[in-house]
Amino acid sequence: MTAKTVLIVDDEAPIREMIAVALEMADYRVLEADNAQDAHAMVVDHQPDLLLLDWMMPGTSGIELARRLKREEATAELPIIMLTAKGEEDNKIQGLEAGADDYITKPFSPRELVARLKAVLRRATPRGVEDPIEINGLLLDPVSHRVSAHGKALEMGPTEYRLLQFFMTHQERAYTRSQLLDQVWGGNVYVEERTVDVHIRRLRKALGEAHQNLIQTVRGTGYRFSARV
């Protein structure tokens, strides 16, 4: 099972550190932010699997960030667990109404946090998302992050892998370079559209003669992944 990525958003460094240690021991990848603005940028750029979000932070509060993420189409499905020192019932309801999937009151034990986190992730992983995808002998395994052609492992960089995964899960549709930048690189990354062409070229090279034609150039638009000639 590939490590799930959790973004911890809390303005108190000792709390972030305590959570990060507990999560890393439980084999999660950890990202950290100490304010809502940085957290939003990291959600867009790194696409974590879950957000641990402190309620009370200077500037934009955790609850405001949760509302914003749930409003935006690209982040609406991101699971959120609110962390807070507030134990009152109305605050819990407010947090859940803002779109939080669960709520944990400080102080909490690392074991309780990990158990809650596992439960939320289990509910949030749609069936089939981690199933391998196979097209004409080209196999992509989202769990192990491996790609093979007719049983032989293919080497490619992380960007080429994400590009291929996006294409294989969105077949037979033409995408512009701008759409691919948003979907694969994230909307917060400022890179030239021609960067897409460079990575498409690398991906085709990695796929080799047998499968490079699956990635088709659509003149005047961009690219399409198709098993049809």
Image (cartoon, rainbow, N blue to C red):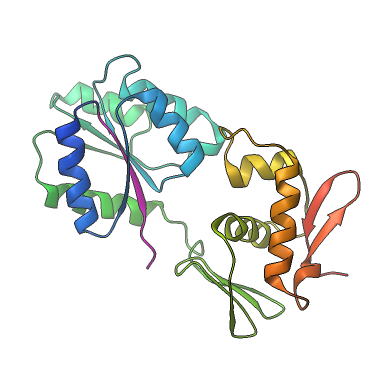
Residue displayed at 57% across by 39% down: 186
6 is within the stretch colored magenta:
yes
- Relative to 35, is 123 above or below? below
Q: Position of residue 59 (x, y in %)?
A: 33, 14
Quarter of the image for residue 172 reads: bottom right
Which residue occupies the foreground of this view, 197 or 76? Answer: 197
- Relative to 96, is 117 above or below? below
Quarter of the image for residue 99 reads: top left
Q: Quadrant of the C terminus?
A: bottom right
Q: Quadrant of the N terminus?
A: bottom left
Total of numbered circles in the picture? 0
Q: Position of residue 11 (x, y in %)?
A: 24, 25
Q: Is residue 74 left or right of residue 195?
A: left
Q: Is residue 172 left or right of residue 189?
A: right
Residue displayed at 70% across by 37% down: 192
Residue displayed at 31% across by 19% down: 61
Residue displayed at 76% across by 50% down: 197
Q: Position of residue 46 (x, y in %)?
A: 47, 43
Residue that protrudes farthest toward the bottom in the picture: 151
Q: Is residue 157 left or right of residue 171?
A: left
Q: Which residues are magenta?
A: 1-10
Which residue occupies the foreground of this view, 163 or 97? Answer: 163
Q: Position of residue 36 (x, y in %)?
A: 36, 24
83 is within the stretch colored magenta:
no
Residue that protrudes farthest toward the right in the picture: 219
Which residue occupies the foreground of this view, 105 or 47? Answer: 47
